[in-house]
Image: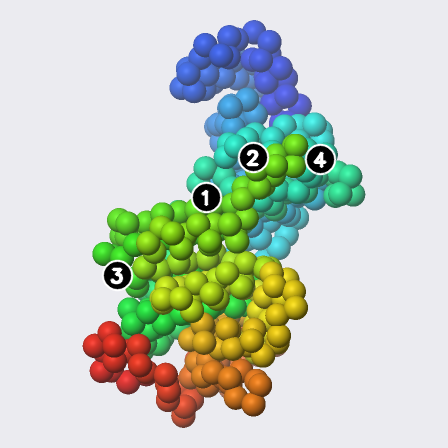
Amino acid sequence: MDFNEEQEFVNGVRYYVTNNLPLNQLTDVELEEAIEDIVKQKLSDRYCTLEQKLSIIKQVYSSIRGLGLLDTIMTDDTITEVMINGRNNIFIEQNGRVKRLDKFFETDRRLEDIIQRIVGMVGREVNQANPIVDTRLKDGSRVNVVLPPIALCGPTVTIRKFSKEPMTIDKLIKYGSITEDIARKLELLVRAKYNIFICGGTGSGKTTFLNALSNYIPKDERVITIEDSAELQIVGVDNLVSLETRNANAAGVGEITIRDLIKSSLRMRPERIVVGEVRGGEALDMLQAMNTGHDGSLSTGHANSSTDMLSRLETMVLQGADGLPLEAIRQQIASAIDIIVHLSRLRDKSRKTMEITEVLGLKDGQIELNPLYVFEEDENSTLEKVSGSLKRTENKLQQDFKLKLAGIREEI
């Protein structure tokens, strides 16, 4: 059976099952067993490989109780991102490369049904009145949905898959993103409650790095995480509160923003606040939290360099407090953020830590930076393959007050 014949057979079995079995009375196991019997019966006079037979059973079951074609894609651990541009155009990122799948959804209605199932899992809504939504799957994978008429090509879904194993610093070392020496220095900075901001472009690994860094947080602290859609995997911290935003309902009420959650978290006796990503006016609330005794906070943001991140933060703060003097904003940023880690996705699709920089403070109206580590390519680099490592600059960490306060005498 080719793909089209297989899909026609799957649709026929699904139609038979939904019209002849009492679905609301069957458990998941009973339904799967019933589908297996029906498939075997209908294939008794046709040749079909064992793998294809199992695939058909899984597709029929997924189309009734799961996410249909998406279930098959999501079980492949080599796929890190799924991009659906309407029912006929499905792209995946696999081993760092984006390619098109030769599979498709039967109809737009089928794709929309799956979208509603995904959104409904976490109690969110997506419809013509509210056509854009951020949500997540049960395994934590991040999902963005845009419906027509906003999406001209049809229902659009982008899924950033959730790693089954939490990212650790050891894995970052193994992947060559940082060295053991740098990992040790980062551990000291986290333990000493330096406010660390991770920046980079789309797909550069900001959340992954934040996950790894968060594992250095002492296990006896109270940690509040704030995200658009919960995907952080902080392990070992018992006193952990995870907060997630909520979109407005069809009536336009009930929205809970990152700003609302940051303000609420300040009344929850946090020892550390971890904001998954700042994109707008919530940057002001995050900076104020960092400046009011909530040291050790971690966050991420989109930017092309450490300097660019500072400029973006200025713009974000202005969105939340229009009319605030630029010098006052820069003073807030300079006194709140201690360390900026810049990540990048390079020309060979590899993700590297490009820079670790200390924020010194305000000097002559400008925020002064002190680069501690900078990525340098070596002689083995080519146009196709990037080779290099983070090199220590001659600059010493100047703001060592927090290290001394934490009883750490090691030099960074």
Q: Is label 1 in contact with label 4 (beta carbons under 8 Å)?
A: no
Real-space CA distance between mark 3 and mark 1, rounded to the nearest whole angstrom: 24 Å
Q: How many marks?
A: 4
Mark 2 and mark 3 lie on one chain; the one further toward the N terminus is 2
Residue 85 x %, y %: 70, 44
Real-space CA distance between mark 4 and mark 2, rounded to the nearest whole angstrom: 13 Å
- Residue highlighted by disc 2: 124
- Marking on residue 129: 4
Instruction: Identify the residue at horizontal 27%, vertical 57% (top origin).
Output: 221
Crowd rating for badge 2 (residues with CA inside 10 Å; few <14, some 14–19, many 20+): some
- Residue highlighted by disc 3: 218
Residue 260 x %, y %: 51, 50
Quadrant that contains the N terminus: top right
In-image side of 164 versus 181 (left or right) = right
Mark 3 and mark 1 lie on one chain; the one further toward the N terminus is 1
Instruction: Identify the residue at horizontal 58%, vertical 44% (top origin).
Output: 134
